[in-house]
Image (cartoon, helix red, strand yellow):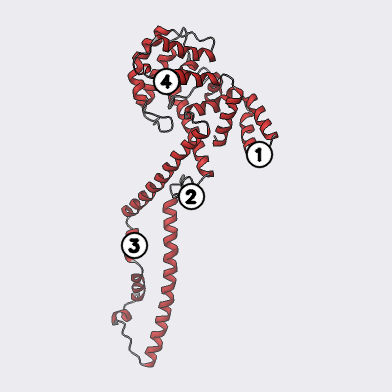
Amino acid sequence: MHYRDLLLAHKAYHIIEKRAIYYDSYMQCRNLREWEASPSYCEIFKLFGFILSWDPHFQGMPAKFKKAYEEILPVLKDLSRIRLETADFNDKNLLRRIAFVFDKIASCSLKYESTDASKILHVLHPHLFVMWDRNIRQYILGNASLARGEIYAKIFLPEMQDELEEAVETYIEEHPLLEKRYSVDLSYIEDPSYYETWYDKAFLEEFDVERRRWEEVQELFVSTQVDEEESGYVTDMPSEAQEEPGEIDRWIEETIDSRIWEELEEEEWLEEFLEEEQEEEEEVYNRKRAIALKVLSGLCDREFLPKIIDEYNYMVYTRPRDFKRLLHFLRKKGVLKNEDWTRLTEKLKDFT
């Protein structure tokens, strides 16, 4: 998604969804210390109250939840060090742990509660878990019944990470000077052949200029030599140069920086050069990426990144008609860019 879609959805969510206050209230009143060990029933009732504010049919069982939470607590503590924006979803062990805690939480009710499990896990670890519901699963996964922890870990969360990365990339593209010290054009980063192409082209152009210059010197030298021989002047050029064919060409080539030319022919040196350049560009990009993530969170009232992603999903897939009406109002008032209107309405047309 474009980063402005994320910002617009965040604002729309807090305008349209009146229940948004329940999330903020719960996050402020929860006792984090209790969740570091075994939460009291009072703390569990507060959590279940937040879930019931969104799902009046929730039938969570406090005793079963308390026991399950104590079982998964060591895994949750390990996961607490992982964030959505940096998680390695190619790590099968990570996927297993996420699926394990998800299924445990979802089974703490009279029936398997997938939507409520995502909400509970999000408030327990808001930096990693993204909430979902039936509509979000239907449109993102193609089937609302794909609700198990394995699907959540293997498909849904990696896709949410990709969405967040796309928002970051669009922000960087439109704000290249995130740090005054770094004004690097990042448009070529996705092309791994950039460095080789750039370096080869630059060197060959420089070599061609040098070669043409020495060809002119060669022609001048030969013509001068012929004139001098005809006039009886003896050149101080070594006799071998006059006797061996191609000696002048070799002499010309030696005037060009032979050391660089030889090193370029060494594949190992060139690979090392490219790796150093790549590392430097990656360091710049990672710095910009970190700034972009902080800016996006700041523009969305410093909310957790998974929460902002959830707000976008909720407005696009669960409340698309309301979102479109608000966008139409903003456009009518002249505060919505035409490009944003076009992009979002194209997205929403499949859901309205």
Cα–Cα span, label 3 and label 1: 52 Å
> What is the secondary structure assignment of the residue under circle 2?
loop
Q: Which residue is painted at 40% across and 8% down in the image?
A: 64
Kind of element beneath mark 4 = helix
Q: CA distance from mark 3 to mark 2?
A: 27 Å
Foreground: disc 3 or disc 2: 2
Residue drawn 67% across the image and 27% down it: 325
Q: Amino acid at mark 1?
A: Asn
User: Mark 2 and mark 1: span between their CA atoms?
Assistant: 26 Å
Give the residue number, with chain letter if any, for mark 1.
338
Task: Report whether 256 appears left or right of 55.
Answer: left
Disc 3 designates what residue?
A: 260
The residue pinned by badge 2 equals 185
Residue under pointer 4: 124
The kind of residue tagged 4 is Leu
Furthest residue toward right:
332
Amino acid, disc 3:
Ile
Q: Residue at x 32, y 54 (%)?
A: 269
